[in-house]
Amino acid sequence: MNLDTFWADAMKFLWDAGWSIVGVIAIIVGAFFAAWILRFVIRRVVAQIVSGVKKNANVTDTQSLLASPLAAVRLVQRTRTLGTVLSNIVNVTIVIIAAIMIVNLLAPTIIGSLAILTAAIGAGLGFGAQNIVKDILNGLFMVVEDQLGVGDVVDLGPATGVVETVGIRITQVRDVNGTLWFVRNGEILRVGNMSQGWSRVIIDLAIPYDADVEAVQERMLDTANALAHDPKWRSRVLEKPEMWGLESISGEALVIRLVIKTRTSAKDDVARELRSRLKRAIDEMGVQLPSLNSIVLTGFEGAASVTGSRPPRTHPTTVVPPKAPKTKRPPKATP
């Protein structure tokens, strides 16, 4: 090989390599641009839906939706969750497509070889990847069916707490102790959502065996009604308090049950305030509460006590009040 042929081959190799590098850079830049465009569209759609809900409810911040219809809060939470999941899907899809295009540009013959190789090892990888596919499909169905959303207080079995992130494979839940749990979507067999619809405050009051049950029940119901009509608390109570009456009889005490239907975000606040008022009311009656040997806590009191279960605060949206229709003045009477 003479020197001229060597340099010709070297220049041809560098020329081809240069164009390949330019093609790879173009694919990467195009992938970033496509991902940015799609994420921008997703964020735009989510912002439009959230802004529309705020305008219809005539509020300027997501926190104010707590006093609005419950469907509006669910729509905002579900829209934001769907936006997060769609953004993750866009990122993964564009990365895979860009990687295939780069490999095809650098070595076109590898794609055909990879197809044959993939067919050979597909059975082995399929068995190992079925859990990933299960996680992705289960996560999509949970979001589409509105089983949970960001900010909900849920019981997923492996973990109980506030949902912080819903991904295509992992759901992040922070419990009452502050521990962040990463739960695979495919391992979630049941979802107990304590943030949808309404909640119920259940107060079981133990009184001595010789107490006047009817008088205590009447005083408890009056105290609960006073709470429900208080200007500070009436927006958090959905229905009138109900006295369910004598719940159990034992040798130690009589247990009377009082319930109030409240908003999901205000359950614990209403329960604590009602307990304080009942304590003062019972003391004023002179009823001495019995000493119980044990106290058993049931339900999801620990999970619902998380103060972080609030919708994320957003920037205020300008709300234009509707213009009052102009009324036509009646014509002046001619003499």
Image (cartoon, helix red, strand yellow):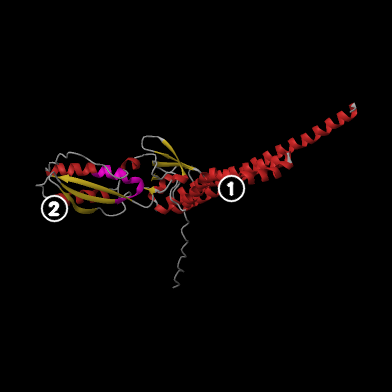
Residue 76 image point, x, y percent = 46, 49
What residue did someone put label 2 on? 214
- Residue farthest toward the left in the current orientation of the protein: 210
Judge from the rendering whether residue 12 lies leftward or rightward of residue 123; answer left or right: right
Single out the residue that lies furthest toward the bottom. Answer: 335
Residue 319 makes an appearance in the image = no
The mark found on residue 323 in the picture is none
Residue at horizontal 43%, vertical 52%?
A: 72
Q: Mark 1 to mark 2: distance in Å? A: 62 Å
Crowding at dot 1, Cα within 10 Å, few <14 / some 14-19 / many 20+, comes out as: some
Q: Nearer the viewer, residue 324 or 62?
A: 62
Residue 264 in picture, x, y percent from top left: 35, 48
Q: Secondary structure at mark 2?
A: helix
Using the image as rendered, state which of residue 63 and residue 92 is in the foreground: 92
> Residues in magenta?
261-274
Q: Main secondary structure of the magenta part?
A: helix
Q: Amino acid at mark 2?
A: Glu
Evaluate whether residue 74 shows in this view.
yes
Q: Residue at x 77, y 37 (%)?
A: 19
- Which residue in the protein does label 1 denote? 41
Left of 70 or right of it: where is 39? right
331 sits left or right of 160 in the view: right
